[in-house]
Image (tube, rainbow, N blue to C red):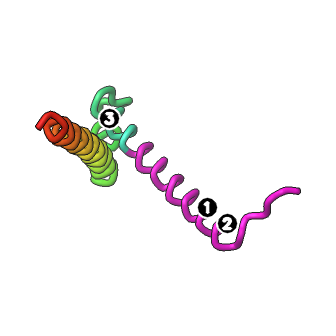
Amino acid sequence: MALVPSVSSTESLALQACDDIDSFHMVRRAYACIEKLIAPQHVNDTDDVHPTRTELGALVRLVNEELQRRIEAAEGSAQLLRDALTHAEARTA
């Protein structure tokens, strides 16, 4: 017997899919920004040479989100290490 997802879980999945698609658009804009900065297609075409504010914003947001993710991961690791050291000290005391 196949499981039928509830309406709320289906709506949740649909919202998550929309969010995921939005994040793909942000990544695409960031990529376009980087591409324009590295290798402009036509030197005389200022639209190709200069990334838009939207593309630059997407690039900065992506970098910031990744930096935040890594900071949180490092903080989590440091907290786990502190907890382990605290427990180890308590056992030896």
- In the rendered structure, are the residues bearing label 1 and label 2 in contact, judged by CB atoms less than 8 Å apart? yes
Q: Which residue is mark 2?
A: 10
Relative horizontal placement of residue 11, taking residue 53 as reference (left or right):
right
- Which of pointers 1 and 3 lies earlier in the amino acid sequence? 1
Magenta stretch contains residue 16 = yes
Residue at the outermost left position: 93
- Whole-Å distance between the Cαs marked 1 and 3? 31 Å
- Whole-Å distance between the Cαs marked 3 and 2? 36 Å
Q: Which residue is mark 1?
A: 13
User: Would residue 3 be seen by someone viewing this image from the given angle?
Assistant: yes
How many numbered badges does the structure rendering display? 3
Q: Magenta residues?
A: 1-29
Magenta stretch contains residue 24 = yes
- Whole-Å distance between the Cαs marked 1 and 2? 5 Å
Residue 79: percent from left, percent from top: 21, 44
> Which quadrant is home to the N terminus?
bottom right
Q: Which mark is residue 34?
A: 3
Q: Amino acid at mark 1?
A: Leu
Q: Secondary structure at mark 3?
A: helix
Residue at 41% x, 50% y is: 26
